[in-house]
Image (cartoon, rainbow, N blue to C red):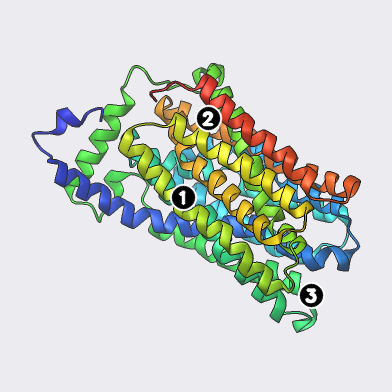
Amino acid sequence: MTGSSDLAPIASADQRNEAYRKITVRLIPFLVFLFVLAWVDRVNVGFAKLQMLQDLKFSEAVYGLGAGIFFIGYFLFEVPSNLLLEKIGARKTLARITILWGLASMAMIYVKTPTQFYALRFLLGVFEAGFFPGVVLYLTYWFPAERRARINGLFMTSFAIAGVIGGPVAGYIMSRMESVGGLANWQWLFVLEGIPSILAGIAVLMYLPEKPRNAHWLSGAEQELVALDIEAEAHDPSKYAGCREAFANARVWICAAIYFCVVAGNATIAFWSPSIIKAMGVQGNFQIGLVSAIPFLAGTIAMVLNGVHSDRHGERRLHCALAALLAAAGLTLTGVFLGRHQEVFALIALTAASIGILAAFPVFWSMPSAFLIGTAAAGGIALINAIGNLAGFVAPYMIGWFKVHTGQLSSGLYFVAVLEACAAILVLAFMPKKI
């Protein structure tokens, strides 16, 4: 690790590991909890869809556009939000984001027309913009590069945990809350899943320290050794520090293209898993929610294991590319088995796709943070995430488009599978073997 040798006389490996263990225990569970709330409020429309479309007379294409338009707002405000975090700090930025997305989610109960649906989904994207790259940036203040794939993996289990928890909870709410208080079950879904986000945003201000030297639960020596580790890395001449440098770097744009392809798969399993599982013949909102948790549970395990294995071997490229190839194969086979009405095999293939998609994330995010620091990291990470997340617009919309024009989900799944294969090709072709 850069700077480790400088600190060796005053900090043993055990002391350093203990300091980072404390940071992990204090920060990661809370950040995971926040992102679970963000993810649930972002994708619960996939469960609301099961009843909302019928109540509001929306087509599948309207749903696909509304689900995806979230990412247009997300794209436009991603970089400004992360640059603001660099200026005013993580606590204020993450609190603002969390409270506003909770309010936007709750406002979905007032949707009556496609235009209102599009507007609120767009605003949800605007308000959530900056959260994920903000946390990725925030973690670079606490963990040096050699520890980040594992830490990213632990944080990004929130994707999968949200799928494991969100599906059954959403299914339960929709099965129990129909017409309670004069609201439809999908309206209750938005209300009951929006309130915790508002409360969590307030908790951010009270709980989250800005940087190691602000962490009262670290000893003075631990604060100093972590801060010096991060500062030593910041002076690495091989890294880019300025925002303009980051935006002019071809590798940043290649990372954005790779991430676009990976996110297409993530958006597919997030927004369309309930519909895919329903197409397998599973009936009942709660049952659909339970079954939808299976792929995400498998993905959670794969995400952590791939991050740990990548750190242990100091290798990023193959860990990311092979995961993307598994995702491509899984999505392709899901489409094949759906078309043949082989439901059990379709679920196994969907689970394999989820494993590949989710396992790619923590390793991918170790690549850009390996050559970006400071303002370059704030702007570059946000730019990569913003462009990549446009796939969250493209994939749901295209799947809805294919569904309307072919009557099947399979064609859309094949489209996304091609994107996952492209991610693997780009990683192998353009990412250096040692990052």
Amino acid tagged 2: Gly
Residue pointed to by mark 1: 302
Q: How far apart are marks 1 and 3 (CA)?
A: 37 Å
Q: Is residue 248 above or below residue 100?
A: above
Q: Which of marks 2 and 3 is in front?
A: 3
Residue at figure coordinates x 75%, y 74% from the top left: 185
Residue at figure coordinates x 74%, y 72% from the top left: 283
Residue pointed to by mark 2: 379
Q: Where in the figure is residue 264, as x and y percent of width and height?
A: 66, 41
Q: Where in the figure is residue 423, as x and y percent of width and height?
A: 59, 31
Amino acid tagged 1: Ala
**Image-based side of 164 in relation to 237, left or right:** right
Question: Which quarter of the figure is the C terminus placed in?
Answer: top left
Q: Is residue 293 above or below residue 212?
A: below
The dot on residue 184 is 3
Marks 2 and 1 in Cβ contact (< 8 Å) = no
Please identify the quarter of the rendering in which residue 235 is found: top left
Residue 257 visible in rendering: yes
Give SS at disc 3: loop
Give SS at disc 1: helix
Residue at figure coordinates x 64%, y 71% from the top left: 192
**Image-based side of 258 in relation to 238, left or right:** right
